[in-house]
Image (cartoon, helix red, strand yellow):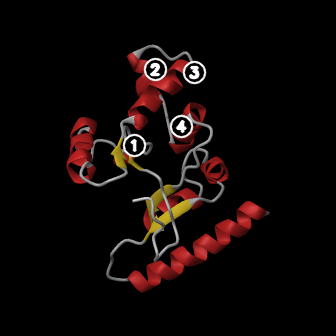
Amino acid sequence: SNETDSETGLHFDEVRVLPVYRHMFDEKRGNQASYDDRLKLCHLAFDHIPNVVVSDEERQCFDWVASNNGVTTAKAKAKMRVGTADLLDMLIERNESTQYTLALGADTFMNLTEWKWKRAKDILNILDGRLFVFRRLQTQIRDDDDITTQRLKTVSLEMKG
């Protein structure tokens, strides 16, 4: 629907679901189902929901980065590190008028704001702070909430300074 959510005050014209094409962190690669299988699972989970689109734009981004950098061989492509900032660059190049918001889990948010991601500060600047952080269900959720809330405040100050 085009209504604003009464609980959060947020409105999104469209939600895009983009499964990770190739994980940036080597230790997480190989621990996942194939990209095509994960893409199919996303379609099964989300295709029936209005205004939710499952997209292979993350896979497209690898080709876009390769093309922009003159990378043509399979061996060179396998070594490429393509991250969220690259994806945002591609999406914005395709449609400059769209404002993107990144939705991620609290654990992933912590990695992003501990600057473990490629071009982490660029991501926050590109998004102009538009992040939607989901808290994970855990046994010690109270402590995790406190840590996440504190990190949100710290990052906000770091980005301003």
In this view, the mark in front (2 or 4): 4
Mark 3 highlights which residue?
68
Mark 2 highlights which residue?
76
Q: Residue furthest right?
A: 161
For marks 4 and 1, the one nearer the N-term is 1
In front of the other: 111 or 132: 132
In this view, the mark in front (4 or 1): 4
Which label sits on residue 91? 4
In front of the other: 58 or 34: 58
Q: Residue at x 50, y 25 (%)?
A: 64
Q: Residue furthest bottom?
A: 142
Q: Is residue 123 placed above or below 77 in the rendered structure?
A: below
Image location (x, y in percent) of residue 128: 66, 55
For marks 2 and 1, the one nearer the N-term is 1
Give the amino acid type for the residue marked by disc 2 in the picture. Ala
Q: Residue at x 61, y 45 (%)?
A: 119
Residue 151 shown left or right of residue 26 in the figure: right
Mark 1 highlights which residue?
23
Q: Is residue 10 placed above or below 98 in the rendered structure?
A: below
The image quadrant that residue 141 belongs to is bottom left
Which quarter of the rendering shows the C terminus? bottom right
Give the amino acid type for the residue marked by disc 4 in the picture. Leu
The image quadrant that residue 20 belongs to is top left
Element class at badge 2: helix
CA–CA distance in space, label 3 to label 4: 14 Å
For marks 2 and 4, the one nearer the N-term is 2
Give the amino acid type for the residue marked by disc 1 in the picture. His
CA–CA distance in space, label 3 to label 1: 20 Å
